[in-house]
Image (cartoon, rainbow, N blue to C red):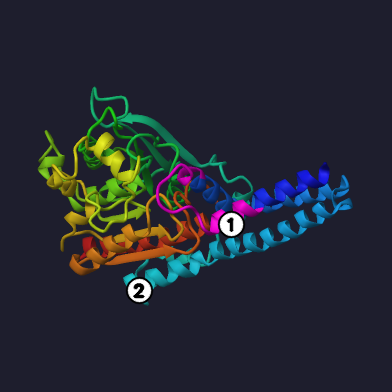
Amino acid sequence: MVSWAFLLLAVLGAWLTLNAHRPHRGFGPITVPSFFAGWLHSELVLHALALQATIVAAAIWLGALERGVGWVGLFITAASWGGMASLLLHARQTGRTLGSALRAGLGDDYKRGLPPRARARLGVRLPWTQLAAPLWFRRGGFEWIRDVPFVEGGHPRQRLDIYRRRGSLERAPVLIQVHGGGWVIGNKRQQGVPLMLHMAAQGWICVSTNYRLSPSATFPDHIVDIKRAIAWVREHIAEYGGDPEFIVITGGSAGGHLCSLAALTANDPEFQPGFEHVDTRVSACVPFYGVYDFTNSGGNLPSAGMGLMWVLERVVLKAALAADRARFERASPLWHVSPEAPPFFVIHGDRDNLVPVAEARRFVAALRERSRAPVVYAELYGAHHAFDVFYSPRTQEVIRGVDRFLSWVYGEHQRARAA
């Protein structure tokens, strides 16, 4: 009995490893389970290895190898561990991928443009102790200001949190984080926390915002709320030590869509009803695994069954693409790319089975063709959707890369202001 149980666990472990390497593509009943399994197995590969090693040791001690099926289970487990080792190797290669992307987008000597503090930490590695507790975000030395309304008397979702280092801050650069969740779920305290804590430790002020969600909300309610949050930051962040003249924005998935759309539609009156006069420009944008074309002109988004296009038509925009294409174009960052776009750092995983990486490739191609500002693109080998939600070897490398990009943009801003 022990031998057969060990074999079943070995087969399960092997499937998890195989799925992490080759997740289910397209949309179907196993798409979401495949995502969760691949995401967790690839980002928590060290924990998975430790757990499987414990199971193997216990199974051998209980006599699993006394029968032939136990040896089959051991062979399968060994092969699975080889695949898991390659997952870890892919994660460790992220740093080199990001370095190459930054040099390609900003120039080989971009490090010379970093502010002195950013240059001083170039060789500093993030603490690997974070990997032991990937969801432990509590740290000393920080102030967390919660649930600040950015619309007076507004919807309960129209609130934001502020992360900043304790002590006196003055004219600190500002980072706004927009959460994902398919425009229907999600919360400002669930995503982007590792990046925000890191940037706050470097003296930045980080703002994580909620927004109204579908199906109660109908687009453009979502982007209007992001614009209102930017407007609130512009007007009030100096009270918290921030610089209202330097605001950058980031987000993942639906948040990647919204932060990109906000960056490309600065001061667009259609998305700023009642506050058209407020300057909603941002100095840079860092979208993670975003959706950039609601019209699906490249055929990248799944439309069969209850696929992403079904969600957009039935739940988010509540309109049919065929009947109102112009509205879908207005909601798509791809259709707003212009020479006035701010600097972009687009990040996407090549194993993403929820938002295909082809979305990012088309968006980056459009930015590079039309924008006058730098465009950096990092396609992360072996990365799934939502890879940066908690601490992992890959997340740590991504944080360091984003830190360098944002520091470079801030350095350019400081030099322009001094001039």
Query: Callout 2: helix, strand or loop?
Result: helix
What percent of the width, then of the height, locates residue 61?
87, 48
The three-letter amino acid code for the residue at tag 1 is Leu
Q: Quadrant of the C terminus?
A: bottom left
Apparent side of residue 349 relative to residue 308 in the rendered image (left or right): right
In the rendered image, the residue lying farthest to the bottom is 108
The three-letter amino acid code for the residue at tag 2 is Ala
Tell me which residue sits at (38%, 69%) in the image.
Answer: 102
Apparent side of residue 182 relative to residue 384 in the rendered image (left or right): left
**Is 214 within the magenta?**
no
Query: Callout 1: helix, strand or loop?
Result: helix
Q: CA distance from mark 1 to mark 2?
A: 32 Å
Q: Quadrant of the N terminus?
A: top right
The residues colored magenta run: 14-33
Looking at the image, tell me whether mark 1 or mark 2 is earlier in sequence order: 1
Give the residue at mark 2. 104
Give the residue at mark 1. 18
What percent of the width, then of the height, locates residue 199?
43, 51
**Label number found at residue 247:** none
Tell me which residue sits at (11%, 40%) in the image.
Answer: 276
Q: Is residue 24 visible?
A: yes
